Image (cartoon, rainbow, N blue to C red):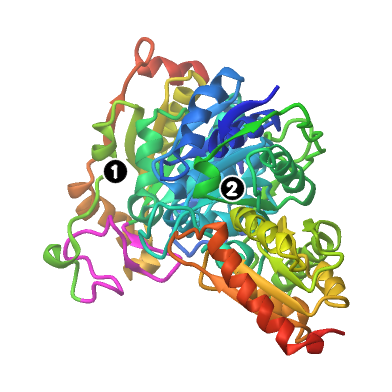
Amino acid sequence: MKQLMSGNVALGEAAVLSGCTHYFGYPITPQNEITEYMARRLPAAGGVFIQSESEIAAINMVLGAAAAGARAMTSSSGPGMSLKQEGISYLVADELPGVIVNVVRGGPGMGSIAGAQSDYFQATRGGGHGDYRTVVLAPASVQELTEIVPLAFELADRYRNPVIILADGILGQMMEPVDFDGLVRPADVDKPWVLTGARGRPPQSIYSLIFDTKLQEEKNWKLQRKFRLIEQNEVRYETHLVDDADMVVVAYGIGARIAKGAIKRLRDEGKKVGLLRPITLWPFPAPALQELVKATSDFFVFEMSAGQMVEDVRLALEGRGRIHFYGRPGGVAPMPVELYRIIARHYAQAQAAGGRGRR
Amino acid sequence: MSTVFQRPKLLKDVDFHYCPGCGHGIINRLLMEVIEEMGLQEDAICVAPAGCGMLLYNYFEIDVIESAHGRGAAVATGIKRVRPQNAVFSYQGDGDLAAIGTAEGLHAANRGENITVIFVNNGVYGMTGGQMAPTTLLDQVTTTTPTGRDADLAGHPVRICEVFSELDGTAYLERVAVNKPAAVVKAKKAIRKAFRCQLDGRGFSLVEILSPCPVNWKMGTVEACRWIDDAMLVYFPLGVFKDAGAAGAPAADEEVEA
């Protein structure tokens, strides 16, 4: 049955239905509804909610709960995510699962409380210290959260790595009809590494300190092999009207929703514009772009930042095709009609330049 | 001939990495003795710190997890909230608990988390080479207070037991030392009481242990032990700072366990 829910509340409900039993969080706008929802919902479902003294404490509680075998989650936004980076680095190093939600707001610093996409680098490049990656999932609608959230817990458990859900203030706050009928709780996985006390087995430990640099290097290669495996297996994206497209817009999350509105207007005018929407920001759908560039010359990157994902598009295309860019930082979300005008101008220029970019 | 003293079974038969005269080795042994004697080896989960105590998993025959610097009480909170049946304790130094992790420690205490914190106070940052700790005494010379700790510049030593005793969530707080045999015996009793407190579900327990660090204090081992009595005890008096919610006389607990 469809219910009208904000993204934040739907995210909380999806987490509970996905088997999240422990939530630790600190209030910060625009994600407070997740924390508040978990405060009422999780204890009733037999789980544990703690309002932590800081985001640093919250992520370390997630680490402890994960080490003890629970599906654990925390959520935050911009400034709070900066504080969580220490713990995320340790989660990766300790190979512990955990789901971290960033309902992105405009930055840097205190920034604004409006939805933004300016934490792309922080999420996809690791964010904390050391040589690591986290899986980054970018939902674009409230309904999609019912797929993204269980997927986040599933991937975290499967790969023993933190997974970041990179939402934004608009998705968190806006209400849309949603049903949870299709949500499948990810199956429990065997976790022989969990600390339970040494009952019926020898003592075991979880740590990331390795003084011997050669062993530390080998541990790093092990992590890197895992990251390559994730890159091979877990790329997810959506395409929309790309088969005949002369220009493909690349946008994610709420940016892709705005782009779809713009593309509808462009298509109404006969302009052949499609959309590639990365759902996994890491691993980035580079193979999809490499396939698209065989038939399409022009790529228009739109994001609500001054230009972050556009770097991944450049890396994926390796000099092929022409890349156009439009970004709005600081929490500004352009209207579809605005984006339509800008894309239309670039489209006209690309057409005038001819199919030079075509391969 | 009867055995009057031996290495506890839970303390691995390996060399400690601790410097000569360091108190950590004694504290490690006391912990394993208490856990063994209380029959907690299958229930105990230790949260090791960043600092001199970070290699506890090399010494303890129990489950151990490493914590980021200062986050031990938060990690222990996460574990305990998943596994309330386990005996969960963090082992933290003075920089760890009284500086970078004060928020995590204080709020775990204030929530009354049913965990135990073993707080090793040696008045100095040991692992990084003898810098000022939050517990460094006034006028004490360290590598970052080369002319002695100046209150105007660096503030005053932090008394964790006294501060935490003001929090309603704390159940058991005691400061002990390991600088002489009689003190070590008392320290062991305090550790036992703290674990008993947790097993009884009474809430947050903490044992602060004044511990010698002769290498970074630039003293001989005997001199360092004396300095605890002569200088540290003046500012950090020993004793029980909180014993709330104990059923009956607190002394009865230890007799039951002994």
**Closer to the camera, A352 or A104?**
A352
Q: Which residues are magenta?
A: B123-146
Helix, strand or loop at label 1? It is helix
Chain letter, disc 2 residue:
A
| Spatial separation of the CA atoms under disc 2 and disc 1 | 32 Å
Residue A162: x, y in percent?
66, 52
Q: Residue B19: say if magenta.
A: no
Q: Is residue A186 left or right of residue A291?
A: left
Look at mark 2 in the image and give the residue it sits on.
Answer: A100
Residue behind mark 1: B160
Give, as a three-letter code, the residue at label 2.
Ile
x, y (%) of residue A215? Answer: 73, 70
Whether A219 is drawn above or below A351: the answer is: above
Chain of the residue under label 1:
B
Q: Is residue A349 above or below residue A51?
A: below
Could you tell me which residue is drawn at 70 percent across and 67 percent down?
Answer: A249
Evaluate whether residue A203 shows in this view: no
The spot of residue A348 in percent (x, y) is 67, 79
**Above or below for A358 versus B198:** below
Q: Looking at the rendering, in which quadrant would you find the N terminus of chain B?
A: top right
Q: Is residue A355 left or right of residue B159?
A: right
Farthest front residue? A269
